[in-house]
Amino acid sequence: MYIERLSGTFAATLPTGIILDVQGIGYGVELPLSTLVQLPRVGSKINLWISTYVREDSLRLFGFRTYEDRQTFEVLLSLGGVGPKVALAILSTLTLSAIERAVAKNDTKILESVPGVGARMAEKIIVELRPKVARLQVAKQLDLQEDFVRLDAAGFDPLLPHADNETKPSGREALFEDLNSALENLGYKDKIIQPLLLKLRKHSEFKDLQDLMRQALKELTQGSIEVERHGKAEKKKAEALPVVPPKIPKTLGFSDDSVF
């Protein structure tokens, strides 16, 4: 028996995910960056679709905002040579539409934009994924869109900024360290991470780790980071990348169902 979904309190942020408190039990749940950047403030109630990854010496939980994302992750894991790290990196970098487009057009460049995926692996993923695309379409059609974030007991939207959610100057550098760890775990190289952190330090204003990650993901998908290669700085331009995650609603006026 596997865990399909968890509902609980977002208790803390980890470099690769969160601690989700479900009736007093803290579950460590690993998340793709695309889900991490959409998390509300710590203490909010959230629901996550769960993929349980079991090996002889470990049991890992991976969480996703939608059922569709969870199914995509599991389909990716079924491909030869694709483990959790690569699957998470794909979902952190590409939308499902971009993945489907890569398969339909046999466009390896889309998948090569994912850290850790080279030309040979991209070709292999496309070949093995092509007969399984139908499973992704079924996930879209199923009416299993559960609530991701709910209004809290005080009756306000946890996605909106609040005074206690602001970053204190003393903790600013710790957030950059967490972002560095998260990007390393997703497979990004230091030559990409360090210029990104430098740019964000100089020009970025943010409220919390999720806000910082959201800005980092935007920079990465726009391909605007300078990288050092053979002693010369050059532009790293991403090809066929998707848009950033959906905009977060700015107004109230919804029930305690999903805001998405």
Image (spheres, helix red, strand yellow):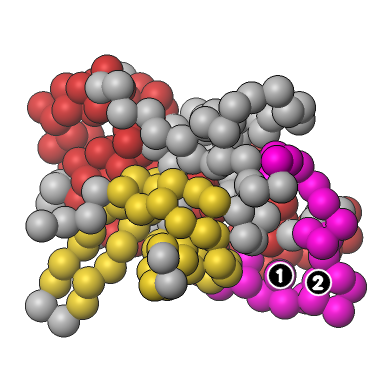
Residue 146 marker: none
Residue carrying label 1 = 176
Magenta segment's dominant SS is: helix
Would residue 1 appear left or right of 71 to someone viewing this image? left
Residue 101, placed above or below residue 245? above
Task: Please provide percent x and percent y for residue 165.
Answer: 78, 59
The C terminus lies in which quarter of the figure? Answer: top right
Q: Is residue 87 visible?
A: no
Residue sitting at x 49%, y 40%: 148
Q: Is residue 168 magenta?
A: yes
Residue sitting at x 20%, y 22%: 138
Give yes or no for contact between labels 1 and 2 (Cβ–Cβ under 8 Å): yes
Q: Secondary structure at mark 2?
A: helix
Amino acid type of the residue tagged 1 in the rendering: Phe
How crowded pointer 1 is (Cα within 10 Å; few <14, some 14-19, many 20+) is rated as: some
Q: Nearer the viewer, residue 186 or 42?
A: 42
Residue sitting at x 87%, y 57%: 163
Q: Quadrant of residue 76?
A: top left
Would residue 39 appear left or right of 60 to someone viewing this image? right
Q: Is residue 181 magenta?
A: yes
Which residues lie in the magenta part?
155-182
Residue 172 marker: 2
Q: Secondary structure at mark 1?
A: helix
Q: Is residue 179 visible?
A: yes
Residue sitting at x 27%, y 18%: 141
Task: Please provide percent x and percent y for residue 155.
Answer: 70, 41
Would residue 86 appear left or right of 93 to someone viewing this image? left
Amino acid type of the residue tagged 2 in the rendering: Arg
